[in-house]
Image: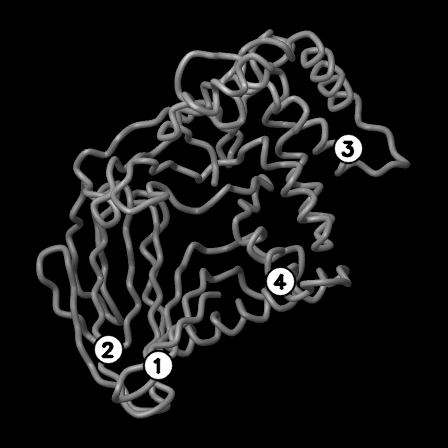
Amino acid sequence: MLETTFRTPSGTAVLLDPLVMGRRERGHALGKSSPGVVLRQITCTSGSMAVETTLAPRPEYGLIRPAMSAVRGGLSANGGSQRLTLSAPLPLRIDGSTAHDGTERQAGQRLDFALSSTVIGGEAAPEPWPGRRIRRRLKDTMNGWRSWTQIHQGYRGPWQKEVSHSGRVLQALTFTPTGAIVAAATTSLPECIGADRNWDYRYTWVRDASFTLQALSTSACEKEKAAYFGFLAQAAATQLDRGVDLLIMFGIGSERDLSERTLTHLSGWRGSTPVRTGNDAWRQRQLDVYGELLDAAHRTHPRDRWFEQPVRTFLLQEAETAARRWNEPDQGIWEVRGPSRHFLTPSSCAESRSTAPSTLASGPP
């Protein structure tokens, strides 16, 4: 749950932004049945605060400007394949595909909002939530996160608070149905404002796996660690017996084709273009991922148990493929976009440092 404090000459307000969890989800069940509702609560904690509310939904990366209409307790926005329902404690003025309102809150007063999404033609449009339900679900979600934290306190040592927080961040980046953990929940945020290294990081990189699994072990997240490795093993299975390269990354549902496209109609964050979805790094050959996945298996599997036969067969294929192909050219850990080459032979190390195009890497930060 993200908490932001605003301070102005007239007063102070605290904003809470959680993605609501399923009712009474606790511990390892956290996220199993999330209804896909974002809550927003702003509370004036001292003095007075002017609050402006704007809803400007732009589905499909801004290609659609939905039709908006007032409903009892909020707004409905319909466009493309989605229907959005906003639960709001005050009426908003509709201007085309945008809605606005301005109000002032005194100390102790709050505003509660909820935004839900449903597929048009599927389930019925949800009714807006009343304020008491929003507050109840917000509290329930907070208790769910606290329960998850309480059972992941096995680490004792330096930076204990930071380690615990890191475990929560990894849990928040996890797609619960498959166990996949994304590198980041964003796309096209630049490494430098105005630059073009604006990559889509909403995928799982095999190279990250051993580091992530190590972090999960440190944070005492054993079940999450097993689920993550299970996802990787299933996503990568059947590739090697077909003689193809082991993919370096996967979608959260084990998707393999992550073809990249540029959204030319968007200006990017602070003018940083291009805006991209997908990541063509999935097409690259990076031979280190064989070792990364083997290391992930080493870090994950209990020492006193055998691997199941399908996983065992796959890992044997991995080791044999790595032994056969380790000296072939590839794109390297820097994910340079261009022809395969040798990066780490003695004769090319100095050359690669001076000539590798630093603006073309596309892996996670």
Q: Amino acid at mark 2?
A: Val
Tag 4–tag 3 contact (CB < 8 Å): no
Q: Amino acid at mark 1?
A: Ala
Looking at the image, which is closer to me, 354 or 197?
Answer: 354
Q: Residue furthest right?
A: 304
Question: What is the number of the mark on residue 298?
Answer: 3
**Which residue does the numbered mark 4 point to in the structure image?**
162
User: Which is nearer the N-term, disc 4 or disc 2?
Assistant: 2
Q: Classify mark 4: helix, strand or loop.
A: helix
Mark 1 vs mark 3, CA separation in Å: 48 Å
Among numbered discs 3 and 2, the one appearing first in the sequence: 2
- All told, the count of numbered labels is 4
| Label drawn at residue 276 | none
User: Which quadrant of the structure image shows residue 356?
Assistant: top left
Which residue is at a point 47% across and 25% down the rendered structure image?
353
Per the model, the C-alpha gap separating discs 4 and 3 is: 26 Å
* Secondary structure category for the residue under label 3: helix
Mark 4 or mark 1, which has the lower sequence index?
A: 1
Which of the labelled discs sits on residue 13, or is there none? 1
Q: Residues within 10 Å of mark 3 (few under 14, many from 20)?
A: few
Tag 1: Cα neighbours inside 10 Å, few (<14), some, or many (≥20)? many
Closer to the observer: label 3 or label 2? 3
Left/right of residue 19 with respect to residue 83 in the rendered view: right
Q: Residues within 10 Å of mark 4 (few under 14, many from 20)?
A: few
Viewer-proximal residue among 143 and 245: 245
Residue identifier under label 2: 51
Which kind of residue does numbered mark 4 sit on? Glu
Q: Is residue 214 left or right of residue 273?
A: right
